[in-house]
Amino acid sequence: MEKTSLKQKSLLIIFGLFLTIVLLEIGLRLAGAVVFYLQERHNHFSFAQNEYRILCLGESTTALGDEDSYPSQLEQILNAPNGQKKFTVINEGIISTTTDYILGHLDQNLDKYKPQMVILMMGINDKIYLLHDPTKSLWQENIKSCLKDLRIYKLAHLLYEHITHRFKEIRNPAKAAEIPSHDENDYQHTENFLKAVIAEFIQRFHDHMAAAAQYRQKGQSPQAQEEEQLGRQSLSAASLTCVQLAHRYRIQGLLQQAQDVLEQATVLKPDSPDVYEEWGELYFDQQKIEQALKAFQAALTLDPHNNDVFLGLARVYHQEHNDNAFFFYAGYLQTKPKDYWARIELAQWLREGKHYGPAEKYLDEAIEIDSTFEQAYLDLGQILDDQGQYQQEEAFYLKEIPLHAQSQRFYQALGQLYEKQGKMDLAKFYFQKATQQDLADYLPITWVNYNLILNKILDRHIKVVVMQYPLRDIVALKKNLGQRNGMVFVENKQNFNQALADHGYWYFFKDNFAYNFGHCTRAGNELIARNLTEVILKNE
């Protein structure tokens, strides 16, 4: 009998291992399918028969706003007709998240909420937060993501985590208990810390006041006064920490929590300018302009040298189209002459009032502060557009495009100019250039994650809405993701362009973190929600 060579034995072993892995993977997927079927059968009876659940996934542009967020407003609009079907819209947006995180938690969210439809608006954070090695090609990223999606990989990873944690427990039980989960949010850690600090300062206040009372009983007035002073300082520190916590809640869009903490801060120190300033910011985010104005005015009365209050008042007056906006913007810039974005805001207010010369002056100053930002250049182009100086506008964009070759916004602006003039061939050319640059703004891993997310959702026969950010072109998403059964695309470009022409940028956006768009105000999120409503009612 012929002997088996070492090479043949090695190949047989490798083949056996490969076959074992394949069979185990198949077995795990079949087991998972059975469990999923049983869960689906159970969950069919766990939800109301007339309830239609929509799961919204994304980053801060989805998460922020609380009742003003687009998911919250979408639910209100969908349920307004009082039809037989009840719509429940779930907001699972996560601040500063990436498509990696959304993909990693997708199964958990789908199992938890059992949605009939998922809305995706994501990808903007990937270039900021994902550690991407430019030497890795798309196929390398694809293989890596596919391997992580294997059931056997997840099983091995789970066993590894369990074994290593048990080993740590044996070596040092106390230390192992302190190890946080990978899913814990840094925001939560900070908020818990701030709550503990508030409680500690309040306790110190009570301790100092109790000590002061004892000193007074003994007739030791100086010591009592000292303790009372320390008590007041503790109360001030507690109030200031409440303001910091409220600020964190506000920037996360948790406006009710921010309001609750600010009410506590007001009770602790009702004459604090910091408390009134944060009230002003909160009211402004809620679009309660009259209350914001009163809060900022109170803060300024308590502390006339608070420059940030000047900016808050400027923004309130800007929203009201009040001439006082100029006074407060100018006053703020006297103390903060290097603030690029304050100059942009002031120039936009001047442009809205057709004060084009002064607007150009502030935009030129913004460029001197930082010539790498493109917003000032684009606003200069729009000033020419507002005045009908199309030839100068065209020459301006053509001059700036080579200096900002990586920006799709200049191509987009020039395309819109040509479209307005009826030069459709040129408009099409520059729109295509903008789209090509828009494609370059996405990382390869973003497309990999997007496709894996879509596959997971559609495999469960759940409908998907792929939505583009405000003012951005949908072409890049359509080109890379393709058309699939059960999936529709939603663009928020035309609706926002029309609305901005009537009301201006800052009516719909709180900032411009992404340069050509930012986090939406209630009005901006309502535009998104109403745009989605028509699509949802057609595809539910």
Image (tube, rainbow, N blue to C red):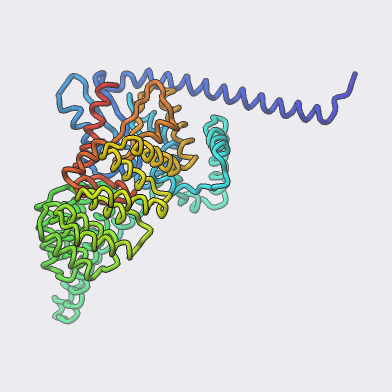
Residue 208 shows in this picture: no
- Above or below, 257 against 8 in this view is below
- Above or below, 241 against 407 in this view is below
Q: Pick the quarter of the image with the C terminus.
A: top left
Picture residue at 13% right of the left edge, 54% below the top: 292
**Residue 255's x, y, as percent?**
22, 47
Residue in front for this viewpoint, 360 or 537: 360
**Residue 45's x, y, as percent?**
31, 18
* Residue 107 picture quarter: top left
Left or right of 171? Residue 429 is left
**Residue 58's x, y, as percent?**
35, 39
Picture residue at 57% right of the left edge, 30% below the top: 152
Q: Pick the quarter of the image with the N terminus.
A: top right
Residue in front for this viewpoint, 139 or 247: 139
Residue in front for this viewpoint, 359 or 475: 359
Picture residue at 27% right of the left edge, 26% below the top: 535
- Above or below, 457 against 299 in this view is above
**Residue 162's x, y, as percent?**
54, 40
* Residue 41 picture quarter: top left
Picture residue at 23% right of the left edge, 50% below the top: 389
Q: How many marks?
A: 0
Residue 335 shows in this picture: yes
Residue in front for this viewpoint, 190 or 491: 491
| Name of the residue lying farthest toward the right | 1
